[in-house]
Image (cartoon, rainbow, N blue to C red):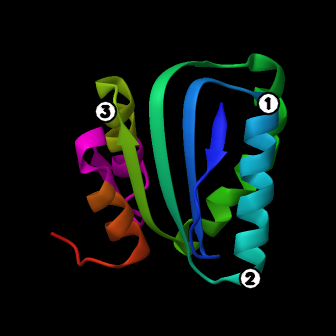
């Protein structure tokens, strides 16, 4: 299940729960393409809840669409991942280490408001 969270046009904000489907991945890529066409820097707020997998049927086309983003890594600003599962927070930290030019932070569900404020620029880095 995917749910968009109301945010400014330069912020991709969404909540993912349970299984991530191919249609979800396509919608995320569509929204990201639109935001990057309009803004030099795009920020990401991702809240996850009980993720138990990704449907493989849509994963191939997602990878094809996502690969060109490696050439645009400098256009990503703040990325906040709020996750109730430790493995997602750990994976995000690994991704952050592999992509050091992007400002990543991970949060627990109890820190959700802090995470959203950080991504939107309402608060400064701690």
The percent coordinates of residue 53 (x first, y second) are 59, 18
**Which of the 4 image quadrants contains residue 108?**
top left
Question: Which label number is shown at residue 90?
Answer: 3
Residue 23 appears in the rendering: yes
The percent coordinates of residue 9 (x first, y second) are 65, 76
Q: Residue furthest left?
A: 126
3D distance between C-alphas at marks 1 and 2? 25 Å
Residue 63 appears in the rendering: no
Closer to the camera in the image, 123 or 56 = 123
- Of tags 2 and 3, the one toward the viewer is 2
Question: Which label number is shown at residue 22?
Answer: 1
The percent coordinates of residue 113 (x first, y second) are 31, 58
Question: Which label number is shown at residue 80?
Answer: none
Left or right of residue 109: residue 10: right
Q: Residues within 10 Å of mark 1 (few under 14, many from 20)?
A: some
Residue visible at 23% across and 78% down in the picture: 124
| Above-or-below relation of 92 to 115 | above
Closer to the camera in the image, 110 or 68 = 110
Label 2, on which residue? 38
3D distance between C-alphas at marks 3 and 1? 24 Å
- Sooner in the amino-acid sequence: mark 3 or mark 1: 1
| Above-or-below relation of 112 to 40 | above
Left or right of residue 120: residue 123: left
Residue visible at 49% across and 48% down in the picture: 46
């Amino acid at each position: 299940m995917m749910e968009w969270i109301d945010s400014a046009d330069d912020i991709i904000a969404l909540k993912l729960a349970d299984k991530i489907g191919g249609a979800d991945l396509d919608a995320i890529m569509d929204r990201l393409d639109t935001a990057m066409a309009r803004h030099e820097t795009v920020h990401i707020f991702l809240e996850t809840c009980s993720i138990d997998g990704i449907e493989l049927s849509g994963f191939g086309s997602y990878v094809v669409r996502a690969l060109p983003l490696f050439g645009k890594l400098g256009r990503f600003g703040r990325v906040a991942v709020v996750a109730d599962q430790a493995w997602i927070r750990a994976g995000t930290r690994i991704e952050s280490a592999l992509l050091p030019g992007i400002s990543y932070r991970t949060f627990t569900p109890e820190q959700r408001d802090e995470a959203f404020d950080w991504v939107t620029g309402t608060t400064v880095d701690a």
